[in-house]
Amino acid sequence: MAKPTTQSVMTLSDKLHRRWTREFAGKPRHTRDLKELERLIEKSAVLAKKAKQLPGEKGDEVERVVRERLTLYVTERDAIAEAQYDRPEVGEIHTLGMRIERCLAVWRRHFAGRDRRTRDLSLLDQTIVRLGPALVRLEELKEMPEVKADQIPGLVGQLEVMKDERNEIEKLRRGMSADDRATSHLAEAQSALDRYRVLFAGQPRTTGRLDILDGILGSLERSRAALVAIADEKHAQNIAVLAQNLSSYRVERGLIAEAHDKVGMRDRTNHLGAAANQMFQLYQQHFAGQDRVTRDLKLLNDICDRLTDLAEQIASHDQAHVEPINRKNLPIVEDRLRRYESEWLEIAKAKSAASEKQTQAATQGAAKAPAPGPQITIAPKKET
């Protein structure tokens, strides 16, 4: 057997540490695989014995690094074991935090500062329904050190803002003229159709959520009924289109329910993972390393909506089944979604700043523009 050298020991230690960084560092402890970490610790312990044999100051330094890393791995193993076996509420707190974060992001992208006449009440209702119980449960767990209790009042206040906004949207619609009310309902219907396109069209049925589809159906039916009540012949075509989509989506609902009943645990994991990978690839193609001012904010909004939906499904799948691959996928999807939501904000800021500069430049240009010279008149072409 070859005698260990400082280079061989350090190379192997770096390899193990890269694995640690990739699979454990900063990851939610309740989702980590303890058996994998135990194997990493065993290899690191063997390496520490080899490092002890290294001569000289350089050998001492390599041994110090290897032993520090081993201590880190053992400490983290104990913390993961505690989170998984002695304090299951740690995982629950993480799940609640992610759900709250996703709800706030949906509010920010779809409602904050937007025209109330065009908002999708079904999407707002679903956001409120998800956020409310999460905050109630977080309040019950606020004595846990992992909970940032000082932030709870602000989050509750945000929930009240959402509820107030919903009331304002309905009040605004009641005071509209028939034409304006029809325009508002058509905008909501278009939003519902867009959600179907993003979350269901061309997607595996096993990755579609029935509660989301029910919300879409509710929006379309509410819009159709409102247009019928207005009783204006000019909306007949829109009413027919909505009725056709409602019929089609209801059939699809049955097929989705059937697909969920038949799919196996591992197949569903694979379908959810593949759908997430599609979003990662779409982001990489259209946004990574690109000039923010030129990016399509609507496309990124769609990507975030789909990943939000997938994160919810992967989290629910993790709670219902002990499926190692799905458990590994969850923090990856959550991390990517966080990054994409942050990029959405940065792109929105960049576009706003660019638009403001253009407005200022146009104003300055108009003030300094010279008086127009003689205009050339173009005679109309004679007909032959």
Image (cartoon, rainbow, N blue to C red):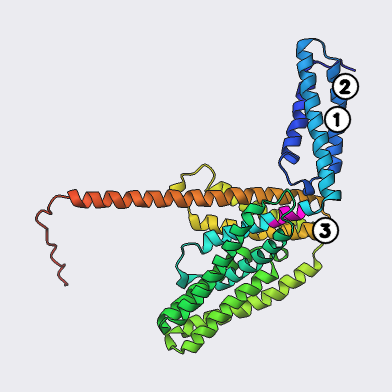
- Judge whether 56 appears above or below 244 on screen: above
The answer to if 163 sits in the magenta stretch is no
The quadrant holding residue 179 is: bottom left
Is 234 positioned to the left or the right of 250 in the image? Answer: left
Residue type at mark 1: give it.
Lys
Distance CA(mark 3)–CA(mark 2)? 39 Å
Is 181 positioned to the left or the right of 7 in the image? Answer: left
Position of residue 364 measured from the top left corner of the image (x, y, whole percent): 24, 49
Position of residue 33 measured from the top left corner of the image (x, y, whole percent): 82, 45
- Magenta-tinted stretch: 91-96
- Judge whether 301 appears above or below 167 on screen: above
Q: Please name whichever residue, 333 or 172, is drawn nearer the observer in this view of the structure.
A: 172
Q: Tell me if label 1 and label 2 are in contact, CB under 8 Å.
A: no
Q: Is residue 37 visible?
A: yes
Distance CA(mark 3)–CA(mark 1)? 30 Å
Q: Secondary structure at mark 1?
A: helix
Q: Which residue is mark 2?
A: 49
Query: Which residue appears farthest toward the left when viewing the image?
Result: 374
Which residue lies at the image location 65% right of the left edge and 71% below the top edge?
213
- For label 2, the crowd category at 10 Å Cα-Cα, with few meaning under 14, some 14 to 19 and many 20 or more, is few
Total numbered badges shown on the rendered structure: 3
- Judge whether 51 appears above or below 232 on screen: above
Residue 315's label in the rendered image is: none
Q: Which residue is mark 1?
A: 43
Which residue lies at the image location 72% right of the left edge and 62% below the top edge?
137
Q: Which is in the foreground here, disc 3 or disc 2?
A: 2
Residue 321's label in the rendered image is: 3
- For label 3, the crowd category at 10 Å Cα-Cα, with few meaning under 14, some 14 to 19 and many 20 or more, is few
